[in-house]
């Protein structure tokens, strides 16, 4: 099974970094269990050659800024409250943010994604911060 959430947060902000910072406020941090950041580097050219290294938040935001300036897809893994559950955020702007639910996906009935958990810990928490979400879509499909 694969699962994802698509968000349109453009009514809240056109600044992707500002939206990424919101995820930190609702419990989704940038560091994995080894204290590393998983991200797509500058000049990745849609190769999706994820990097994993110890860098500061500021360094990450500088990388994201360069990618936005270059018109590249921004990619970063986010982890919930320092746990193993994670999502991969992919976006070029705030009009369409794709959250791939792939890292230690919460499941029910031995295979289906527990979408209620993700709605509660992403959508509802953003709404509680008064983030205006123009649309969101949840999808799950078999490989």
Image (cartoon, rainbow, N blue to C red):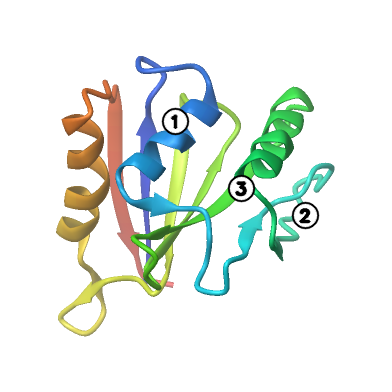
Relative to 125, 46 lies left or right: right
The count of marks equals 3
Q: Which residue is mark 3?
A: 75
Mark 1 vs mark 3: which is more N-terminal?
Answer: 1
Crowd around label 1: few <14 · some 14–19 · many ≥20 (10 Å) = some
Q: Are marks 3 and 2 in contact (CB under 8 Å)?
A: no
Q: Is residue 25 visible?
A: yes
The front one of 65 and 54 is: 54
Relative to 34, 126 lies left or right: left
Q: Which residue is mark 1?
A: 19
The front one of 4 and 24 is: 24
Residue 24 appears in which quarter of the rendering? top left
Q: Secondary structure at mark 2?
A: loop
Q: Residue lying at the far bottom in this picture: please name it.
A: 110
Residues at marks 3 and 2, CA–CA distance in whole angstroms: 11 Å
1 vs 2, front mark: 1
């Amino acid at each position: 099974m694969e699962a994802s959430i698509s968000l349109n947060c453009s009514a809240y902000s056109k600044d992707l970094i500002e939206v990424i910072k919101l995820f930190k406020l609702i419990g989704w941090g940038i560091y994995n269990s080894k204290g590393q950041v998983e991200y797509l580097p500058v000049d990745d050219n849609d190769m999706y050659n994820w990097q994993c290294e110890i860098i500061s938040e500021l360094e990450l935001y500088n990388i994201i800024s360069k990618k936005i300036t270059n018109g590249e897809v921004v990619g970063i893994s986010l982890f919930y409250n320092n746990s193993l559950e994670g999502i991969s955020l992919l976006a070029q702007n705030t009009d369409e943010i794709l959250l791939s639910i792939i890292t230690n996906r919460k499941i029910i009935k031995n295979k289906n994604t527990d979408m209620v958990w993700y709605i509660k810990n992403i959508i509802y928490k953003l709404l509680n911060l008064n983030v205006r979400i123009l649309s969101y879509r949840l999808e799950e499909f078999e490989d």
